[in-house]
Image: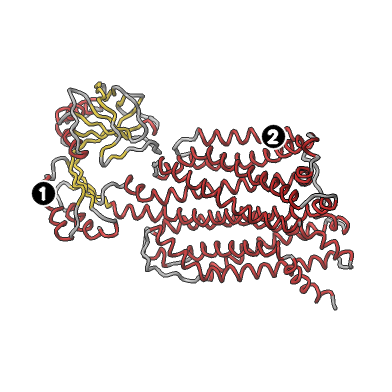
Amino acid sequence: MNKWKLLPQLARKAVGQNGKVYYPYMMAGIFSVFTFFAFSSIVYNEELIKDLPKAAYAWMMLSIGKVLLGIILVPFLYYANSFLIKRRTREFGLYSILGLEKRHIGIMLFWETLLLYLGVMCGGILMGSILSKLLFLLLLKVTGLPLDLKFVFSWQAVKDTALLFGAIFFINLAYALFQVGRSKPVELLSGSKKGEKEPKLIAVYGILGAVLLGLGYKTSVMSEVNSMIFTDFFLAVFLVIMGTYFLFTSGSVVLLRGLKKKKGFYYKPKNFVTVSGMLYRMKKNAASLSNICIFSTMVIITLICTLTLYKGLDGMGLYTYPYDVWAEYGEGDIDRETAEAKVTELEDEYGRQAVRKDLFDYMRFSCQKEENQFGKKRQGARYEDIFTLYFLTLEDYNRLENDNKMLEGNQILLLSEGKDVGYETIVFMGMELPVAEEINHIYPFPKAGKDTFETEFVIVVKDDAALNTCAEAFAKENGITDVEDFLDSGYQRLGVVLEGKDGNKKAFVNELSVWMQAQEGFTGVGNGLEERSINKAMFGGLLFIGILFGMIFFMCLILIMYYKQISEGYEDQDSFAIMQKVGMSDKEIKGTIHRQILLVFLLPLAGAVMHTCAGMFMVENLMAALGLYDSRLMILMTALVCLLFVFVYGISYLTTARTYYKIVR
């Protein structure tokens, strides 16, 4: 038969005969195509943003997620392909001995790559066409968008997916051709069984790894909720990844060398195969262990962020927008009886109860802060030194909080929007105000332990006379001559919270909002329902991305573990055969395999848990930067995810280990 006609058939048979390594690769490729196609289809869905302005936030998040997903998939599929080529070098050498030239092997590789590409694309697009609608419904659910939006099949998404994966498979083909082209037939025959030299500069690797990991941990632990938090996060991730690789490279070699020197330990049959096998492939061992550790950490962190965001999404909206609807007026422009009568009228009309009907007066001052002193803003002052102070009377505070606190003279109640400041007194425009108590809540001024800006304080004074005294001091310090007019420049806020879920409040809120805007002295209105729905669209997009990215990371982790067991199984096959011939029992073989798997199982898992513990400081700050300040929820989700991951990780590793045992047997 003509060689040129034979090559496509050889390519097809090669894929089938190597199904143990190719089929998982194809499944991972199909899932990758499906995920990227689903992202692209939703991004190109015009229905999503045509009539719903708030959907633009979800669309923006998905567009960013699509790019990040493409960046993640390129090295992952390249890594998997390099394993396939490594496994087949002996086969390529045999083809060379039988008369095939390197160009013929190259053409065969081209046909293999084409078959794999077409299979992965067809399977992924078919899977995407069926399941993308479910993902679309999931997106609508987590973002709070209407469920009647239609999902439309996008040919542009097919084009983008075909181009990305075409480029990935082209890179993989180029790598395979390079490996075959630069090797001699004899090298190809022995390539898959070639041992590895010990890495040089072990001490340097160890020191460098410890330093990088320490810097990464320090960056995480010392991080603060500020404008640099996201930059610091990516810096910490980079440092931890590099530190992990260097430490696994040096640490594994030092450990194995030490075990080898202990002759009483090393020359026992149950230990000899394990240690010698790991020494045989120490570089690859370090790379795979560090990859497993890193991807395990990615899965854990992604799940923690995703679940915390999911459980805390409603709380985030209520923290930022505590009222369903609110309006502001000039001081004294609206009376309580009129406002309560209107709310009661709408309660009867819509059959819904208002759980809060707040009306309170306050004054707002902008000051420059130095320690516990709040003074006049100076020219050239730094942004972080400028604070906003809200002044309320004790009567309004007790009404808002349903409390009965008392104050004497110049005493105040103090609330910092961030962490407690611990001041015994504050100095406001030269006036010393003793702090009777530092409180942690005034509705609608919620307190967060960590806040991105921490630039607001709420001060509760005894009565209107005390409030006017503070206002006069501010006017005097800032050169305001018309003091009487300034004393009348305060605000009133009318805020209403309705019972039930947000989706059933819209008509009530809209009618009340129209009435609020028609009242005398109106200066501004806010619709908490609408603002919370916008927030949900934006953070729901992040949540959706987190779910899919968690699935991708877990797929990468499983495939790396599977290929590690496969490759080590083939490499250890001859060693176990020899040990059986010299008298090693089946029980001893199982014990050796169990010991090796346990070691490889525990090291990356321990590293991942350690990385997670160190990273939780930064993850908590990241959540705070997004507006989620629930530390208890974060701790609960962390414990839950770690336990769940250990369980699933153990099952996954034991499942892949069976393949290893079947090979060596």
In the shown orientation, is residue 400 left or right of residue 241?
left
Give the residue at x 56% y 41%: 609
How many neighbours does mark 2 have within 10 angstroms: few (below 14), some (14-19), or many (20 or more)?
many
In the shown orientation, is residue 377 left or right of residue 520?
right
Above or below, 330 relative to 85:
above
Q: Earlier in the sequence, mark 2 or mark 1?
A: 2
Disc 1: which residue: 338
Image spot of residue 529 (x, y percent): 29, 54
Disc 2: which residue: 206
Above or below, 147 relative to 290:
below
**What quarter of the picture does the C terminus occupy?**
bottom right
Image spot of residue 546 (x, y percent): 49, 53
How many neighbours does mark 1 have within 10 angstroms: few (below 14), some (14-19), or many (20 or more)?
few
In the shown orientation, is residue 379 left or right of residue 344?
right
Q: CA distance from mark 2 to mark 1?
A: 74 Å
Does the residue at mark 2 contact the one at mark 1 (Cβ under 8 Å)? Answer: no
Q: Amino acid at mark 1?
A: Thr
Image spot of residue 382 (x, y percent): 40, 31
Residue 57 in view, yes or no: yes
**What quarter of the picture does the N terminus occupy?**
bottom right
Q: Amino acid at mark 2?
A: Gly
Above or below, 543 relative to 480:
below
Image spot of residue 551 (x, y percent): 54, 56
